[in-house]
Image (cartoon, grey):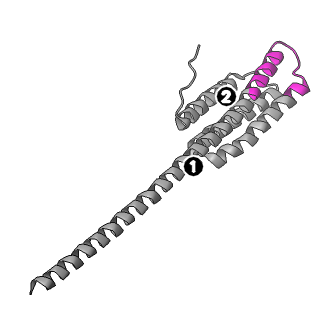
């Protein structure tokens, strides 16, 4: 092999190395850009889902707490010797129905453990309302079930959202 051939081969190898190096760099850069876009989309989706969950959880809790307040007021009226007004019982049924409707958003946004706790709370509310409507005087179990259900729901929802529960005073 003479010097001319060696120079041509060396130049060809140099050009090929530069070309492959450039193509490899472009491939790595394109792949990194795709990964960055995918990661950004994932972060945006997680943020959107957290916001939707937060709205659903707060809406449900508002309706459930309203139902609990109405049921407690109805119970006080009933235990003080008064006759619970039909309008009070109807208000409790409407609030429970609203909580059950808000449960749909929780079903859609998940996760399942929050859905279960919300469904258990709705069941407890319905049981409490039924006992009040029937004039049952042993309401302690139903009242506790609602309170425990509300607390369990709050714990699960707070865990999913990564928030702290408000301190009890």
x%, y% of residue 6?
A: 13, 81
Residue 133 or 89: which is nearer the viewer? 89
Where residue 158 sits: x, y (%)? 56, 32
In depth, the one of 16 and 122 nearer the eye is 16
Residue placed under numbered mark 2 in the picture: 146
Q: Residue at x 56, y 31 (%)?
A: 155
Number of numbered discs overlaid on the protein picture: 2
Q: Is residue 76 magenta?
A: yes
Q: CA distance from mark 2 to mark 1?
A: 34 Å
Q: Pick whichever, 30 or 102, lies toward us.
A: 30
In the image, is residue 120 above or below residue 22? Answer: above
Does 85 sit left or right of 21 as displayed? right
**Which residue is labeled 1 in the image?**
45
Residue 134 visible in the displayed image: no
Foreground of the two, 55 or 16: 16
Q: Residue at x 50, y 55 (%)?
A: 37
Identify the residue at image location x=38%, y=66%.
Answer: 27
């Amino acid at each position: 092999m003479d010097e001319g051939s060696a120079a041509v081969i060396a130049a060809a190898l140099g050009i090929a190395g530069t070309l492959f190096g450039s193509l490899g760099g472009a491939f790595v850069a394109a792949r990194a850009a795709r990964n960055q876009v995918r990661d950004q989309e994932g972060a945006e989706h997680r943020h959107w889902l957290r916001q939707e969950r937060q709205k659903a959880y707060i809406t449900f809790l508002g309706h459930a707490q309203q139902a609990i307040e109405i049921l407690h007021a109805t119970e006080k009226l009933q235990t003080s010797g008064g006759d619970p007004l039909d309008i009070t019982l109807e208000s409790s049924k409407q609030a429970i129905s609203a909580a059950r409707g808000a449960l749909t958003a929780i079903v859609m946004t998940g996760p399942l453990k929050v859905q279960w706790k919300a469904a258990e709370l709705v069941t407890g509310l319905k049981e409490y309302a039924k006992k009040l409507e029937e004039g049952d005087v042993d309401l302690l179990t139903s009242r506790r079930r609602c309170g425990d259900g509300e607390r369990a729901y709050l714990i699960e929802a707070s865990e999913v959202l990564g928030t702290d529960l408000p301190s009890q005073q």
